[in-house]
Image: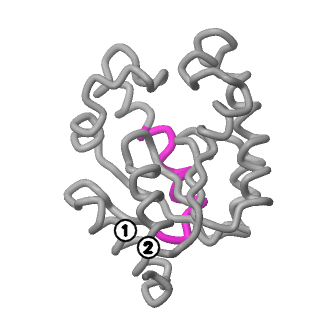
């Protein structure tokens, strides 16, 4: 069972913050999108283009269930993983931190990153729609929420540790 699960939209900092959290806690970091890429051999964007979003979401549900059952460090979930009701149900047994990010900060962080298939075209409009649709689901699964917009990576890490009462466990 993971020590901590991170959820949030693209550019919330799940991988960046998760990696640093794992270092501070002396545990491993695992990312479910990376698990999918390792298993399938293609980038997430390529899976979306070649097989479609439903095929990717099916792979994602399996990857998340396996990681929740078999990883004991910090786990970062793909931004859309919370769309699956079965994933949200699995998350009820875990310590889940929602890394919240506003549209302006997310666009600033993403820039022109074309590896994010759901943000092609107008990233600002896509992010706004994505955040509006997913925000209630992120909040539903979260045991803690950390606003990341105006914080550095290490400030977010500190806020996460404080929010889930792991401050004394960090090195």
Q: Which mark is residue 24?
A: 2
Element at badge 2? helix
Q: Do the residues labelled 2 and 1 touch (CB within 8 Å)?
A: yes
Task: Look at the image and say whether residue 103 sits in the magenta stretch.
Answer: no
Q: Residue at x 37, y 32 (%)?
A: 127
Residue 22 position in % (x across, y down) = 50, 66
> What residue appears at the point 63 percent right and 44 percent down from the top-left corner?
32
Q: Where is residue 72 in the image (x, y as percent from the top left)?
A: 69, 67
Q: Which residue is drawn at 43% across and 82% down?
A: 171
Q: Which residue lies furthest to the top in this view?
A: 50
Image quadrant assignment for residue 131: top left
Name the foreground residue: 74 vs 61: 74
Please name which of the two marks, 2 or 1, marks the residue nearer to the observer: 2
**Which image quadrant: the N terminus?**
bottom right
Numbered marks: total: 2
Mark carried by residue 23: none
* Left or right: 1, with 166 as reference point: right
Badge 1 density bin: few <14, some 14–19, many ≥20, Cα 10 Å = many
Quadrant hosting residue 94: bottom right
Question: What residue sits right under mark 1 in the picture?
Answer: 157
What SS does tag 1 mark? helix
Q: How crowded is mark 2: few (under 14 residues within 10 Å), some or many (20 or more)?
A: some
Q: Where is residue 128 in the image (x, y as percent from the top left)?
A: 35, 34
Magenta span covers which residues?
131-144
Q: Where is residue 158 in the image (x, y as percent from the top left)?
A: 34, 74
Task: Examine the image and state in which quarter residue 141 appears.
Answer: bottom right
Q: Left or right: 10 with respect to 143?
A: left
Give the dominant element type of the magenta stretch: helix, strand or loop: helix
């Amino acid at each position: 069972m993971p020590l901590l699960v991170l959820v949030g939209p693209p550019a919330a900092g799940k991988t960046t913050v998760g990696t640093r959290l794992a270092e501070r806690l002396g545990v491993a970091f695992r990312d479910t999108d990376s698990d999918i890429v390792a298993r399938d051999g293609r980038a997430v964007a390529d899976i979306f283009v070649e097989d479609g979003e439903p095929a990717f979401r099916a792979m994602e549900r399996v990857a998340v269930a396996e990681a929740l059952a078999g990883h004991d460090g910090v786990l970062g979930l793909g931004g859309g993983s919370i769309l699956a009701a079965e994933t949200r149900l699995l998350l009820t047994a875990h310590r889940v931190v929602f890394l919240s990010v506003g549209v302006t900060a997310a666009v600033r962080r993403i820039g022109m990153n074309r590896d994010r298939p759901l943000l092609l075209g107008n990233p600002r409009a896509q992010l706004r729609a994505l955040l509006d649709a997913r925000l209630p689901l992120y909040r539903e699964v979260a045991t803690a929420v950390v606003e990341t917009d105006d914080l550095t990576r290490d400030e977010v890490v500190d806020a996460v540790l404080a929010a889930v009462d792991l401050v004394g466990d960090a090195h």
